[in-house]
Image: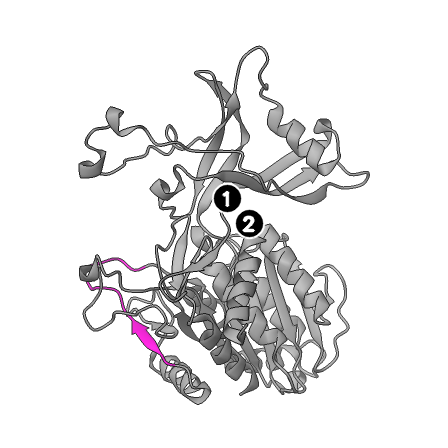
Amino acid sequence: MSKEQKNIQDLLSFIDRSPTPFHAVNEMKSHLTEQGYSELKESSAWELSNNSKYYLTRNDSSLIAFITGTKTQDASGFKIIGAHTDSPNLKLKPNPTYEKNGYLQLGVEVYGGVLLTTWTDRDLSLAGRVILKGKKQPISKLIRFDDPLLRIPQLAIHLNRDVNEKGLALNKQNHLPPIFSLTGKKSPTKDLLEKMIAQKLKCKPADIVNMELSLYDTQPGSTGGAEGEFIYSGRLDNLASCHAALQALTESKGKDPMTRVVAFYDHEEVGSDSAQGAGSSFLKEVLERLTLESENPRETFFRSLANSFFVSADMAHAVHPNYPEKHDANHMPILNGGPVIKCNSNQRYATEGISSAWFESLCKKAGVPVQKFVVRTDLGCGSTIGPITAANLGIRTVDVGNPMLSMHSIREMAGTKDHAPLIKAFKEYFTA
């Protein structure tokens, strides 16, 4: 197996094991621990050494890892790559279970910009975390049901004759609740879900204080295409960027005067305004604590920020062959064409002339091709954590990402030959 193939298999395994941000962060914690990184707690005092490896989490759904620089106290600055751990999905409501027309169903809430129709007629299950009673304080437990438990069946075409002409219109409240079971005298009752969770966690149903569960597709990721050139998987946006950045950091060898950092946030898909989102103080506080041992901490911190650079890594829009008119004619990224620099004059992306030129020269040095994307002038543009971080910290920023299709679908598509070059570019950044 080539290194490229190994990278793809490792990526697919990581995504399959990460149906929620809680699972993704847990996977990354395990990998960092294996690589010799020490865990820090925000509530504890830090005793850091130069050229040493650390990580910490917030809410178990956001994570920051770093290798301290040899001259951190001299305002050498920070090399940072940021990405996000969350993906659009359907989340269970606090009191989800109800009976209707002989079925047991679960109420769901739409999280982020979901392509709703892609969630119909799929073999779905549940994953997330459960909060249990503890002797002194609540206990958080990860949970995942591997077998298909749920389905959102479409209405038969016989009852919706013009669906192919008018499209499938789904009411979020009425049409998205999945079927969980049947009701009846000998059938499960409304507390079935709690009983199944208690059995899986080996606790009593009464011990369950809260649940944060999401639906996910049980079909594992795979490669396909005539020559195996495509990736088919859920949550490529944006776990693929997390995987590339983490691998680049853990494979980054040698000493560097600058501190190398990766920051992976939850809640990007809903605006980043949370205690663990990119709009929070999480990264800023971590970076400031790295300069506290200098003679003039505040001065060193501000000078360090001025000497820093931030790479916002989020997947990009490849041109769709069936809808080329949705792209600007001079900006049509293709799968397996290399990472994409994303630009927007209205600051939906944080890229500007100098940061774009810098990343392009970095890729050239690494032997990695570069593509560019700007949205059509008559279409709205999505955004990333890039502008938020640039505004919060005043750090020069570039927005980049690998091209993909079916963004925000339950099952997305990317190129197998794009992942390794992105890792290579990120490694060049961390070693330059």
Q: Which residues make up the magenta segment?
A: 369-381
- The image shows residue 429 at horizontal and vertical percentages of 51, 82
Q: Nearer the viewer, residue 311 or 401?
A: 401
Total number of numbered discs in the rendering? 2
> Do residues under tags 2 and 1 come within 8 Å of each other at their CB atoms?
yes
- Report whether 370 appears left or right of 202: left
> Which residue was labeled with disc 2?
20
Above/below status of 37 relative to 356: above
Q: Earlier in the sequence, mark 2 or mark 1?
A: 2
For label 2, the SS is: loop
- The image shows residue 62 at horizontal and vertical percentages of 59, 58
Residue drawn where x is 20% and y is 67% of the image: 328
> Which residue was labeled with disc 1?
216
- Report whether 115 appears left or right of 84: left
Does the magenta-highlighted stretch encompass residue 188?
no
Above/below status of 416 relative to 142: below
Please identify, in this view, whether the residue under mark 2 or under mark 1 is nearer the observer. 1
| Image quarter hosting the N terminus | bottom right
Question: Majority secondary structure of the magenta segment?
Answer: loop
**Which three-letter amino acid code belongs to the residue tagged 2?**
Thr
Query: CA gap, disc 2 to disc 1?
Result: 8 Å
**Which three-letter amino acid code belongs to the residue tagged 1?**
Tyr
Residue drawn where x is 65% and y is 59% of the image: 57
